[in-house]
Image: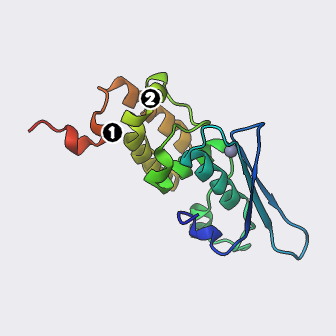
């Protein structure tokens, strides 16, 4: 939750689900504050799953600025599963402990996730930047991920600096 200042001070109910990796719920009755809940599967739990569900709560939070400026619209995290994966990986290296579920990853990257995690995170951050001027930023990101899989596999957990020959 420390990684989510947007949720600071908001009570979040946490429960268990056996049906999915996780599920997030934002419920709101008229004139009352929203109710936030996440349910997580307890087998093979990862920070990525927890981060993904908390990101859904941010996505589903009621609009703080109903009359949005262009900048506020651009900063708002868009809804959708792939969007949730992208913003979760970009948010913190903490959430890079497992591959995302919905983002289309080449098999090579999915099977060697630890080697690629840092590079994929960098691309997610770049995609969020790209979105400001390019509507098809997810398509761009998935094309970049394909290129990443074709390039030689990164070493040392994807840290390019350490991979430089000295
Ligand atoms: Zn989701």
> Is residue 64 depicted above or below 156 in this figure?
below
Looking at the image, can residue 134 be seen? no
Mark 1 surroundings within 10 Å by alpha-carbon count, few (fewer than 14), some (14 through 19), many (20 or more) = some
Does the residue at mark 2 contact the one at mark 1 (Cβ under 8 Å)?
no
Q: Residue furthest right?
A: 30
Looking at the image, which is closer to me, 39 or 100? Answer: 39
Up/down of 55 relative to 19, above or below: below
For image coordinates 56% across by 44% down, the residue present is 46
Mark 1 lies on a secondary structure that is helix
Q: Residue at 57% across / 70% down in the picture?
A: 5
Q: Position of residue 40 (x, y in %)?
A: 70, 47
Q: Nearer the viewer, residue 115 or 47?
A: 47
Residue 43: image x %, image y %? 65, 38
- Ligand 1 picture quarter: top right
Q: Residue at x 62, y 64 (%)?
A: 73
Q: Mark 1 highlights which residue? A: 157
> Which mark, by number, is residue 71?
none
Tell me where residue 128 appears, x and y as whole percent: 50, 52
Separation (CA) of disc 2 from disc 1: 12 Å
* Rendered position, 92 above or below 116: below
Residue 107, visible in the rendered structure: yes
Residue 27 vs residue 12: left or right? right
Pointer 2 or 1: first along the chain? 2
Label 2 neighbour load within 10 Å: few <14, some 14-19, many 20+: many
Q: Quadrant of the N terminus?
A: bottom right
For residue 109, which numbered disc appears in the image? Answer: 2
Identify the secondary structure beneath mark 2: helix
Residue 157: image location, x then y, percent: 33, 39
């Amino acid at each position: 939750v420390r990684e989510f200042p947007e949720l600071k001070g908001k009570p979040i109910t946490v429960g268990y689900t056996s049906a999915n990796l996780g599920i997030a719920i934002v419920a709101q009755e008229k004139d009352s504050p929203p109710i936030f809940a996440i349910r997580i599967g307890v087998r093979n739990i990862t920070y990525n799953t927890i981060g993904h569900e908390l990101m859904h709560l941010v996505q589903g939070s009621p609009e703080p600025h109903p009359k949005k400026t262009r900048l506020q619209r651009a900063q708002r995290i868009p809804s959708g599963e792939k969007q949730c994966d992208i913003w979760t990986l970009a948010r913190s290296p903490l959430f890079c402990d497992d591959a995302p579920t919905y983002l289309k990853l080449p098999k090579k990257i999915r099977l060697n996730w630890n080697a690629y995690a840092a590079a994929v995170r960098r691309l997610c951050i770049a995609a969020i930047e790209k979105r400001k001027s390019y509507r098809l930023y997810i398509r761009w990101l998935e094309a970049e991920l394909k290129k990443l899989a074709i390039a030689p596999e990164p070493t040392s957990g994807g840290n390019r600096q350490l991979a430089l020959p000295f």
